[in-house]
Image (cartoon, rainbow, N blue to C red):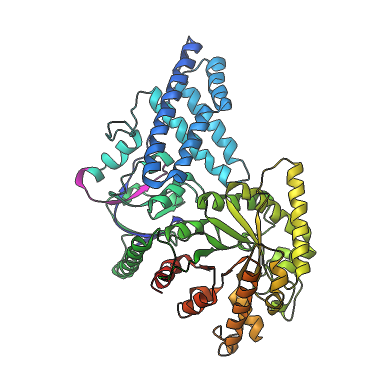
Amino acid sequence: MRTIQGVSVSAGIAIGTVRVLAAVDYAVERRLIDDPQAEMDRFRAARDTAVAQLKQLRDNVAAEFGENKAELFDAHRLMLQDPDYAECVEGLIAQDKVNAEFAVKSAAEQFAAMFAAMDSSTMQARAADVKDVSRRVMNVLQGKRDSTAQDGSVQGDAVQNGIVQNGIAQNGESRIIFAEDLAPSDTAQLDRAKVLGLVTAKGSANSHTAILARTMGLPAITGIGDAFDPADDGHVAVIDGTSGAVFVDPDEATLTEYRRRKAEAEEHLSLLRKLKGKPTETKSGQRVHLYANISRPSDAAAVLANDAEGIGLFRSEFLYLEREDWPTEEFQFDAYGQVAQEMGDRPVIIRTLDIGADKQVDYFNLSHEDNPALGYRAIRICLTRPEIFKVQLRALLRASAYGNIAIMLPMITSVQEVRDAKRILEEAKSELRGERIDFNESIQIGVMIETPASVIMADELAAEVDFFSIGTNDLTQYTLACDRQNPSLERFADPHSPAVLRMIQMTIEAAHRHGIWCGICGELGADLSLTDTFLRLGIDELSVSPTSVLPLRNVIRNH
């Protein structure tokens, strides 16, 4: 057995035979031409044909996966119609007197290098897109037909050199695709009935190819680099799209374990098919919004795969915890914007950084504390170091122009803390207005209720914000005076304690008195033994781990 570690881009397990796609040679001959104008005309005609092909591909994707997922091919069309792109191609033709194919390839390399050099990982991923659309124009110039032909025949260059010629379509056996790389248009045209999963040597989690793989429900791993070996063709493999692990020629123990996991996943998928798109509503008509908790942008795929209605808690501190230096505004904007775009119209509630206590970061240079859970953490850091806080707020506001983002403040104990945070938020808004940067002027603000003080002050807090979300992990810790990091206190730290449940009840009642909604984003939200209690208390929203969404919806719908 050979084990390879890559980067997970789409969750799921695939077990099957490998089909290695041969790399398509895009070498273009450089030819000197006598009539630059004629060559420019060839380029323009080929570009128009490529735009028409992308329109057809866009319509195909929209019909199967929805308008949101088809938008990337609108972006591809805009790339081809960009005046700067056309000016670059035509400039090369005119100045160097080269053929259109070579000018397109040269322009693609220039634009790809420009994107790759940018700080934003989303923009870096666009390097693959500009190569993809340019390749399409080169194919037209070279007389190669596209697999999106109106007659439905499979004629694409990459598809012919891969799936059809290598035998998947011929013998009907589904395969795991190994490739150096896959362009978004290639991925969109894969026959899902013949493909079990994808493994590529190159690529990134932010690429449109990765997003398409998630949309198509294909387990996918990228970034295996030099471990990519064409000799794996025909061998059995297991890919774990959650961990990013690839097992070539797996031993019996690995096969047995992954067959078991796959069976469990298929059982879950059966539940998904039964409940997907169904409202989270009791038999008596009580409606509950069912959201999911995430820690990283890549987790958004699991939210959609499990049909959550939104993200109730995006733990933004992981953007800080997983770095060795301060995450810049651009880095954070990139992360939040990526999630907002992927979630479409669904709400994305992002908790501002909750560093401190059990989550320590060296570059924050926090002093040692005897009782860190009661110390300098979360909103306390943000309000005393506003230069850090404002960077995050600016990034959140900028990302709000791309989706349904809300901001949630952690560890609140007083009304003054909320007002101070809102003042810094207003400063950030004012700066962005001055810079003419778009954002959602009416972005919602909420607070986490996780201290007894915030419960007692819930009526006053409700007048300041748009929603409450109860963090039951910390609320239990602070209500029962039990450090949740101390294993010897486990028997005393009972989250089912009547004191904790009464705190939850008081919070819900205060929220409703003031016309705002109240949810739970702590671990108790997924505790099926308490679902009946939460429904009786009138909870409006529950946010749980993505895999807990469907079992919880099932219980609520049968209530």
Which residue is at the far left?
Answer: 171
Residue located 47% across and 30% down the image = 134
Over which residues does the magenta segment extend? 170-183
Q: Quadrant of the C terminus?
A: bottom left
* Relative height, residue 214 to residue 158 (above, below): below
Q: Quadrant of the N terminus?
A: bottom left
Question: Depth check: 91 or 384 in front?
Answer: 384
Is residue 174 a member of the stretch shown in magenta? Answer: yes
Residue 94 seen in the current view:
yes
Is residue 489 a member of the stretch shown in magenta? Answer: no
Residue 482 seen in the current view:
no
Residue located 24% across and 43% down the image = 169
Quarter-of-image position of residue 88: top right
Residue 233 relative to residue 519: left or right: left
Question: Depth check: 178 or 427 in front?
Answer: 427
* Relative height, residue 345 to residue 130 (above, below): below
Count numbered badges in the picture: 0
Which residue is at the far top?
Answer: 34
Residue located 75% across and 72% down the image = 414
* Relative height, residue 132 to residue 537 (above, below): above
Question: Depth check: 186 or 503 in front?
Answer: 503
Residue located 77% across and 57% down the image = 424
Residue 336 in the image, given as x and y percentages of width and height: 60, 53
Residue 6 relative to residue 334: left or right: left
Residue 482 in the image, given as x and y percentages of width and height: 64, 85
Residue 552 in the image, given as x and y percentages of width and height: 44, 71
* Relative height, residue 112 to residue 141 (above, below): below
